[in-house]
Amino acid sequence: MSSTPSTPAATSVRELAEFLWEQSPGHFDGALSKILVSAATTPGARFLDFRISTYAPKAYVQSHVHPNKEQIYFFLEGEGLLELGTEKKVVRPQQFAFIPPHLPHALHNTGNGQLVFMVITTLTERG
């Protein structure tokens, strides 16, 4: 029984400076992201979204849920307040948060400088 080898996904090496900062819906007061990998922007990517975000002091994303996505926030600089359901957690560099589907979450920059973090999102339902 022979199997057909799968075609590898396209690969790419890119530079952060190639990407523009965007303010997505539900993000306010200087909550910006560079979408580095996504199905819409990266050939071969189907289930993954990878971005770097920077929030100015006072910037935030309003509370929202993702019914079919898992997320990881990895904090690089600054400090903020992450709301996970009814819990509120102070976040700082070298911390990360796993956000499962259906969990309401919001993030506020409560510090004096930029809050910088990576966001990794993947679909939980493929197809």
Image (tube, rainbow, N blue to C red):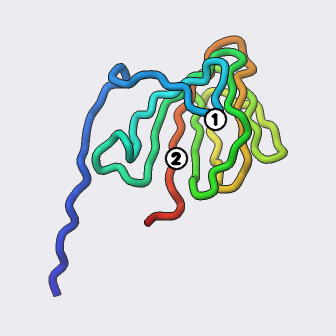
Residue hosting label 1:
95
Q: Height in image: 99 above or below 118?
A: below
Q: Is residue 20 left or right of residue 42?
A: right
- Out of 108 and 118, give the one closest to the viewer: 108
Q: Is residue 33 left or right of residue 80?
A: left
**At 38% across and 47% down in the image, what residue appears?**
39
- Out of 122 and 25, give the one closest to the viewer: 25
Q: Residue furthest bottom?
A: 1
Amino acid type at circle 1 is Gln
Residue hosting label 2:
121
**At 68% across and 48% down in the image, what residue appears?**
65
**At 65% across and 42% down in the image, what residue appears?**
97
Q: Height in image: 11 above or below 70?
A: above
Amino acid type at circle 2 is Thr
Q: Residues within 10 Å of mark 2 (few under 14, many from 20)?
A: some
Where is residue 79, by image quadrant? top right
- Point out the tag, 2 or 1, that comes first from the N-terminus: 1
**At 44% across and 33% down in the image, what residue appears?**
35
Position of the N terminus, as image quadrant, is: bottom left
Q: Residue furthest front?
A: 25
Distance between the Cα atoms at labels 2 and 1? 17 Å
Where is residue 4, by image quadrant? bottom left
